[in-house]
Image (spheres, rainbow, N blue to C red):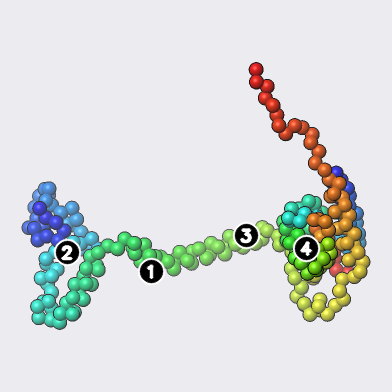
Amino acid sequence: MGCCFGKDEDEYSGEQEPDERSPLLGNQIGNAINRPVTSDDFESQPSITKGDEQSALNRILHQTENNVIDVSALDSHTMEQHEYMDRARHYSTRLAIVGGNLRTMRKPVLPIGTTVPQAVLAGEPISIADIQLINSAAATAANALSNVKVQHKEELVVHFVIP
Amino acid sequence: MEESLDKQLDDTMNVHGVVGVLAADHQGLCLASKGNAQVSGAGLMSSLAEAGKQLSSDEQKCPVVCLESDTCNILIKSHDNVTMAIYKVAS
């Protein structure tokens, strides 16, 4: 029975008729991510026996990295390329359009401040008449509100007549 | 009932230079508004008045807060849990 790393699958990877031993991913040899590691990969490395051992180990490590599918890093890896920049540009343009509409839809609660603050600071403070106006208005409003009473016009609790 | 508060706001609106009035409770709920005053500004007016109260050690004394701008001045004062805001054109 062959497995992903077994040598047995080599003899079944030819042009035979597909049977129960045919590898399901046999046609994806060109895909570096899904390609299983076979013995051919290591036989084609002459540096293992005669080259620098460290470079050979690095090559094996690099090859293993290519063969391992890191699912957790798959999305972020693809997003960090051109797609990320495209999305950021798309979102910023959409936000500029929608944000401009939102800003025009809602009126500001407070009026826009002064453009010449030094003139306002150097000017006269508010008049005594204005202070008297707001004082009397606040006192009258508080007095008027104190007379507001809740009038119960109908029963809050309704009794159902159960026969 | 609320007719007296409504009449009082109308009287304030008739004062020369006043372009809007607003009454809110101490929690920022708008009780009434007329003229240029926006209902959504009730919470802001109430919190400004509450912040002004903290300037004085006497809790009964609430100072008059005045927001000055090029278009109008906003006079804010709190009295017995009622905050009044008067939008008045700068004279």
**Which percent across, then down, holds residue B26?**
76, 56
Left or right: where A27 falls relative to B52 = left
Q: Position of residue B7 (x, y in %)?
A: 89, 49
Q: Chain of mark 3?
A: A
Chain that bears disc 1? A
**Residue A24 % position (x, y):** 18, 53
In what element is the residue under mark 1?
helix
Question: How far apart are the alpha carbons under marks 1 and 3?
Answer: 31 Å
Which residue corresponds to mark 1? A81
Q: Left of B21 or right of it: where is A85?
A: left
The answer to whether residue B28 shows anywhere in this view is yes
Name the residue tied to disc 2. A37
In front: A150, or A13? A150
Can marks 4 and 3 be said to lie on one chain?
no
Callout 3, which amino acid? Asn
Q: Judge the density around disc 3: few (<14), some (14-19), many (≥20) Cα neighbours within 10 Å.
A: few
Residue B33 percent location from the top left of the image: 80, 53
* Tag 2: amino acid: Val
**Circle 4 Cα neighbour tier, 10 Å, few/some/many (<14 / 14–19 / ≥20):** many
Residue on which disc 3 sits: A101
